[in-house]
Amino acid sequence: MTGFGNAEGVFRDRKYSIEIRSVNNRFSEISFKYPKYLSSKDFELKEIVRKKISRGKVNIFMNVDAENETLVNLDADENIINEYFGLIKKIKKIIGTDEEIKIEHILTFSDLFTSGVTNEIDEEEFNFICDLLNKALDDVNKMKVKEGESLKKDILERIKFIEKESAVITKMSKDRIKAEKDRLRKKVETLVSDKRIIDENRLELEVVLLADKIDITEEVIRLRSHTKYFTEYSKSKELAGRRLNFLIQELNREVNTIASKSTDAEISQKSARLKEELEKIREQLQNVE
């Protein structure tokens, strides 16, 4: 699900601001943009995110403003500058150009300068950053909860529709058995001129076999069981996205079986409508954690 969150805080002379944007995705994709000195903590930071957001494309932007930042002592590495200068002259010779080498050509190389700044961060400051990140993630999840409630309402209404239609299909199927019995008798009567030689026992056996073939009682029972569990899991506090996806697959399997057993056009149409509703639910569940 989509979500936005932010958090701000000051540690010593540094003001940190964290902004998180989360969009729908079937998998977990986490992207960080932070100061260079936090690169060694990339794994720990992403683990914090994974604990609170299990699915989605998450972009996290961390900015730092130093209020009393001391001037950094920069120095140029003479050896590296000479190497790059020689490399540029070699390139000029290869491509056959007389273009003058300017200072901006040299300055494009980022490793010409060194400073006394270390890439390490002390534990106290890192703990502060982690706490700030958790606050921003909680802010994201508040927004996602609101969206999730709206999504849950829509999905559960579709589940209720499926339950209601399955009850109608069950009644239609039972009525269909009697209609099939009458149809079978009429068909036999048209083929046999003397109605007295019709084997009633054989006819009843054929009706029983036919009724068993088109009976959808078991499928409807399993379908109702799946919708019951679906409703329960959708209201639970656990992350049930993958479990709900599994139940939708099972529901779809039962509806497919009902459709294949049906010899009635109206039941087939209702089964097709149920499949449409299940597909809509399946698409929405791709965003549910």
Image (tube, rainbow, N blue to C red):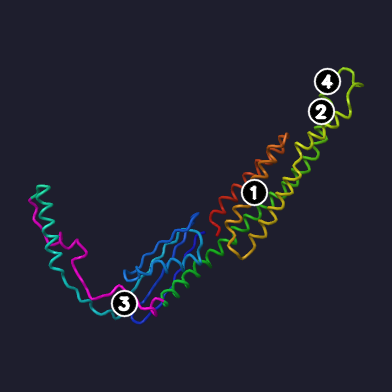
Residue at 81 percent across and 24 percent down: it is 187
Residue at 72 percent across and 51 percent down: it is 224
In the visual, does 99 lie left or right of 26?
left
Q: Which residue is mark 1?
A: 250
> In front: 134, or 273?
134
Secondary structure of the residue carrying numbered label 3: strand
| 3D distance between C-alphas at marks 3 and 1 | 56 Å
Q: Which residue is mark 2?
A: 184
Q: Residue farthest to the right?
A: 196
Answer yes or no: do the residues labelled 2 and 1 have beta carbons within 8 Å? no
Three-letter amino acid code at the position of disc 3: Ala
Q: Earlier in the sequence, mark 4 or mark 1?
A: 4
Residue at 56 percent across and 50 percent down: it is 283
Q: Earlier in the sequence, mark 2 or mark 1?
A: 2
Three-letter amino acid code at the position of disc 1: Glu
| 3D distance between C-alphas at marks 4 and 1 | 43 Å
Counting from the top left corner in percent of width and height, residue 204 is at: 86, 32
Q: Which residue is mark 4?
A: 190
Q: Earlier in the sequence, mark 3 or mark 2?
A: 3
Three-letter amino acid code at the position of disc 4: Thr
Q: Which residue is mark 3?
A: 66
Label 1 packing within 10 angstroms: few (<14), some (14-19), many (20+)? some
Counting from the top left corner in percent of width and height, residue 119 is at: 30, 72
| 3D distance between C-alphas at marks 2 and 1 | 34 Å
Q: In the rendered image, which quarter is residue 147 located in?
A: bottom right
Q: Which residues are magenta?
A: 98-126
**Pair 3/1: label in front:** 1
> In front: 204, or 109?
204
Three-letter amino acid code at the position of disc 2: Leu
Whether residue 1 appears in magenta in the rendering, the answer is no
